[in-house]
Image (cartoon, rainbow, N blue to C red):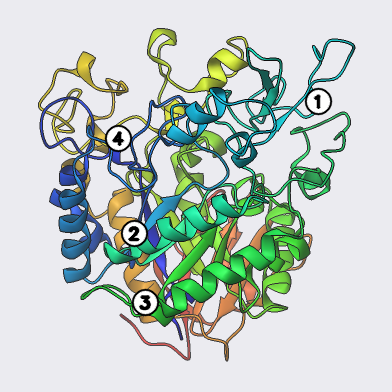
Amino acid sequence: MSWWRHAVCYEIHPRSFADSNGDGIGDLPGVTAHLDHLRHLGVDALWLTPCYPSPLADGGYDIADHAAIAPDLGTLDDFDTLTRRAHTLGMRVIIDLVPNHTSDTHPWFREALGSAPDSASRDRYVFRPGKGPDGTLPPNDWQSAFGGPAWTRVSDGDWYLHLHAPQQPDLNWRNSEVCSAFTDVLRFWLGHGADGFRVDVAHALFKAEGLPDAGPGQHQDPLRNHLMPYYDQEELHPLYRDWRTLLNTHPARPGACSPDDRVLVAECAVFAPERLARYVRPDEMHQTFNFAFLEAPWQARALRQVIDGSLAASGSVDAPVTWVLSSHDAIRPVTRFGSELRARSAALLMLALPGAVYLYQGEELALPQAHIPDDRIRDPLWERSGHTDRGRDGARSPIPWSGSAPPYSFTAASPDQCWLPQPPDWADHCVDAQRGDPRSCLALYRQALRLRRQYPATAQAPLRWHSAPHAPYLAFQRGALACVVNLGPDPLPLATLGLRGHPVLSSTPLTGDTLPPDAAVWLVTASGHRP
């Protein structure tokens, strides 16, 4: 079985991971210095969020040069050192590819602003004349995912499209020069040892011909995302087939994945399972994040519906489901679910499911969402929402490594010099504080990943439910490993479930044969053996 079908990957937001030079900003040498943490955790790959030069209007997703490293994060040599070290430790390296837009400081966009309407330079982006007698109205009714209109007018009267911040102009993927440039970007990073790419907003590159109005309710109901004229267009799929062919044929650097073992990962906010599955057909992407699972409430019925729908849709195209519980864009599970116990139990649920998994840095430490003071917020959502949406910075507060107070060995700089602040009560969440504690969240994740490898899911042992569709708990088995999660208000006697096995891991200590509310347990059934 290919590694990516069952891989556990670890997302790293470099600026918040570890600072090697004392400037208060995490960097690539800091990541390299802490790769042993990932090895001991037991992950198969790491995913680096953007490391490119950027004005940071959107946390690095506004890119000024797609074939370079941001100076505050290091150098290209630092990237090469990181990939070599990761490969030596047996881990693959996946990097972010951001093809939907550039920074407004990108040379292409600066050239476009200095060129005439309808010029070749402007055709690399989505420029249009406005509506109304003087062109003072936007070309259509499209709204930005960050709030407000998705159009900004320039001095000569033209408007340009940005589905995100105004500093992130959308590229025109019907322009052959854009397609060719990103083929070169893929080749460049493959040549530097990348084993795969996570494709940012993979559902948004092509917009419907004619740019028709989208109507009311945009960005309010994710179940309707695939109906929007700027999402999920048919032209995406030939492009991704071309990229898959490139990854399968481009020569590999020594130590990196062989060409047929590389991976393309879609960040695709399409919630209809049958539509999402189209991105991972055999000749397209390898994985696509399952955001429906991430956004599901703490309810047995809702979670089961997502699990069943996801497995059925992905199975129809012979692809694994890629489960996600947290990310740099989501409220951390401890806060989202309302308790550390629920977050631990959700992790055991996710890690027991067949398919691939992505963890986000700090998830293994049970970090809650950090409160970021108003004057320290960097996320553009704060300004675009008129200070009603605090944005995603609370999930990006730097990792606590050791110590009793900020900056918890994240940096040698003072806490007020850190690029984002850390809460004063995170001492117990530090890596060093949890490393020797067998009941810590870090110990739970390490043990879960070890057992996951010991009792792998296989095609010959699909998931089998032992709970009724409307039960207040989830119980299933895949191979020798069974998982039970009690989402109801009452203790759950395990003996009533018909699962013959012994507990090997639980999110909280068990009392006898009873599973407390909000708790989860793994059992090895009679066909398995004790670890």
Helix or strand or loop: what does disc 3 sit on?
A: helix
Callout 2: few (<14), some (14-19), or many (20+) C-alpha neighbours within 10 Å?
Answer: some
Q: CA distance from mark 2 to mark 4?
A: 23 Å
The quadrant of the picture occupied by the C terminus is: bottom left
Q: Which residue is tagged 2?
A: 189
Q: Are marks 3 and 1 in contact (CB under 8 Å)?
A: no
N-term-proximal mark, 1 vs 4: 4
Q: CA distance from mark 3 to mark 2?
A: 30 Å
In the image, taking residue 124 as reference, residue 109 lies left or right, namely left
Pointer 3 or 4: first along the chain: 4
Residue underneath mark 3: 453
Label 3 vs label 2, nearer the camera? 2
Give the residue number, with chain letter if any, for mark 1.
139
Labels 3 and 2 touching (C-beta < 8 A) = no
Q: Nearer the viewer, residue 195 or 415?
A: 195
Q: Position of residue 79 (x, y in %)?
A: 22, 52
First in sequence, mark 3 or 1: give its number: 1
**Mark found first going from the N terminus, 1 or 2:** 1
Looking at the image, is 18 positioned above or below residue 4? above
Amino acid at pointer 4: Ser
User: Circle 4 is placed at which residue position?
Assistant: 16
Asked if residue 487 can be seen in this view, the reply is no
Foreground label between 2 and 4: 2
Given the image, on which type of amino acid does mark 2 rest? Trp
Image: 63 above or below 251: above
Asked if residue 169 is positioned above or below residue 283 in the image, the reply reads: above
Nearer the observer, 457 or 120:
120
Q: Position of residue 404 (x, y in %)?
A: 16, 27
- State if disc 2 and disc 1 touch (CB < 8 Å): no
Nearer the camera: disc 3 or disc 4: 4
Question: SS class of the residue under badge 2?
Answer: helix
Name which quarter of the figure residue 4 lies in.
Answer: bottom left
